[in-house]
Amino acid sequence: MKEKKISEDKLPELLKTLKDKFLVLVPEENDGVIEFKALGDTYAPLPGFSNSTRPVRTLFHLTYEPMFQFANSEEGFSLEEIQPEEVKRVIFGVRPCDANALGIIDNLFKDTYEDSYYLKRRENTYIIGLGCDTHDDACFCTSLDVSPVFSQNVDLMFNLIDGTFIIKSNTEKGEELLLSLSDLAEAKDEELQKLNEKEEKIKESISRNVNLENIDSRMRANFENSSFWQKVSGKCIGCGICTYNCPTCHCFDIIDEESKEGKGARFRCYDSCAFPLFTKMPMENPRHYKWERVRQKVHHKFEYFPLNFGVIACVGCGRCIRQCPVNWDITEVINEISKPDNKG
Amino acid sequence: MEEKLKKEVAALFDEKKIDYFVGYAKGSLMHKTTPLITKDKEEALKTVINPFIYNNLACYLRELPGRVGVVVKGCDSRSVVSLLQDNQIFRENLTIIGIPCSGLIDLEKVVSGIQVERHEITSIERQGDKVAVKAGGKEKTFEAEDLLFDKCLNCVLPVPKEADIMIGDKDSPPVNKEKSYHIIKKLKEEESAERWNFWKDQFKKCIRCYACRNVCPACSCTRCFVEVNRPQWVSPVQKWQDNLVFQMIRTIHVAGRCVDCGECERACPASIPLRSLQREMGDNVKELFGFESGMDKDEKPLIASYKDTDPNEFMR
């Protein structure tokens, strides 16, 4: 389908139309935190560069969710499965990096075990991407081959060019969504040309760079280099910001909560490899030292995930750098991992 | 100041007085700094001093082996003293390098003041009571007290007391108690139901990343109560109730140790005004027990001392 367009000031109206059929979520700023919230009376775009404080994956893989509830009484033991509510959602304003990240973790959630919680939400959600007009100094999407203006994992992609949104449909779901909207004009070739120019301009201006040349062999060769990991992990305080707010991290814990009356529920909730208690319940945390936990995080993204699914689990959104209380910088660490000799 | 610091650090390495240096280096993001922990003299000379040296480096002292030279601002020095009082670290292993502090600039306040994003701001310069900010074509001068962290405006100890080496002369941030306390004051004026709703909403935002705990030098437990799971004290499920209980217990645990360095609030990715809780607790401690954290290393810690004048209404 050819790209469509809509004038910038018509966007609130368009989103309002969608509200009749869907739960429409848009980014909203409150108290210094940008979150996707249900669209209110009208849509107010956020100024300048902005991305949600937490990645959009937190709307699919929830911080915590009940899996089943149980009751233990004189009549016996009962179990009731809890599945997520089937709500048709439209998420507007998803940045290309975060959309790409969904594509990456889809691999895991639909692997040997199909995760119904995540996958049902994916199925019931229309992702409308919003291309970046600018970036900040933590962004490094271009290093990971993520375009700042498009992602294969959106249904529709919006890009603002001179007061007009160019709309590209990327999936059948996207086309279905476009058709449900009143007739939109087709974008002109020169507008598409301008979009290409915008993309090139942003790509050029992103200077943060991570060197991924021979990354797998470099990572492997450096694994045992404990003095390297001790050094680079020195200033890390071992909190969970970079994992909890990472668009590709996905570790969780399973917890039962029971009341005195014997009623309760089993929850799945976020957990982080940065924590000493990680995996302590099923067996033991094999990573006793902070440097081992830091190494795990980096290796999982840049070595193990690619081994399992053929793709690096990083999209360069920059949150782990931007939000870090000590400015720990994963790009510096990756770039410092020495290049291997050419023997492969 | 920076040059003097570098000279002192080089001398400490040359005279083999320290194994590690803990200071600040230029960060990888505009205007930010990052903790610098190194055994290497050359690397240590990358150390910087500027109004953005946020981190309270005392939080690293417990984990570093050997003799450590550490850079401290006034508030950080109180954390060091508090750790000494608690026998968590040993004075003979430390070379404390004190920096008299005229206050730290809060980048968020700069951004909202000039309405330009952090990475686009070209320079932020402290000039006495003023701060000059340049961004693109814009240039604006602010009163320093409008851009400093709230905590700095009621600083108890701008010049570190317990220091072996002092870099620079006396310095102190402007005092504006009202500004420093604006959130606390507003909360205190509210009805308790309103206040309850406020904190309930705040802790709905909490993701339990524990950054507040991990940046905090006063949080010195080897195993935090949230990591004790047999029995489970607090559920790891990130519901607001458990989030709030975690923070309430943390607040009480750091009573008599918290020095109002404000790092918990700065580190919080959910922008929860945590300092209001900690500062209020600190003020309560002072009012009830006449104790101010981290002022004198030879004083007994609050929890380990008893005075006839301690309030004891609860025993009646």
Image (spheres, rainbow, N blue to C red):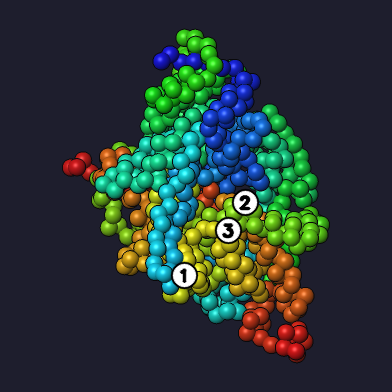
Q: Residue at x 60, y 60 (%)?
A: B264
Q: Is residue B99 visible?
A: no
Q: CA distance from mark 3 to mark 1?
A: 22 Å
Q: CA distance from mark 2 to mark 1?
A: 37 Å
Query: How busy is the neighbourhood of tag 2: few (under 14 within 10 Å), some, or many (20 plus)?
Result: some
Q: Residue at x 72, y 55 (%)?
A: B150
Residue B1 screen position, x and y as percent: 64, 55
Q: Quadrant of the N terminus of chain A?
A: top left
Q: Is residue B173 above or below residue A144?
A: below
Residue B245 screen position, x and y as percent: 59, 66
Residue B271: numbered disc: 2
Left/right of residue A174 with respect to residue B289 in the rendered view: left
> Which of the two discs, 3 and 2, sits closer to the camera?
3
> Which of the two discs, 2 and 1, sits closer to the camera?
1
Query: How busy is the neighbourhood of tag 1: few (under 14 within 10 Å), some, or many (20 plus)?
Result: few
Secondary element at tag 2: loop
Tell me which amino acid carries mark 2. Answer: Ser
Secondary element at tag 1: loop
Q: Is residue A307 visible?
A: yes
Q: Are marks 3 and 2 on the same chain?
A: yes
Residue B240: numbered disc: 3
Q: Are marks 2 and 1 in contact (CB under 8 Å)?
A: no
Numbered disc total: 3
Q: Which residue is mark 1?
A: A262
Chain-order first, disc 3 or disc 2: 3
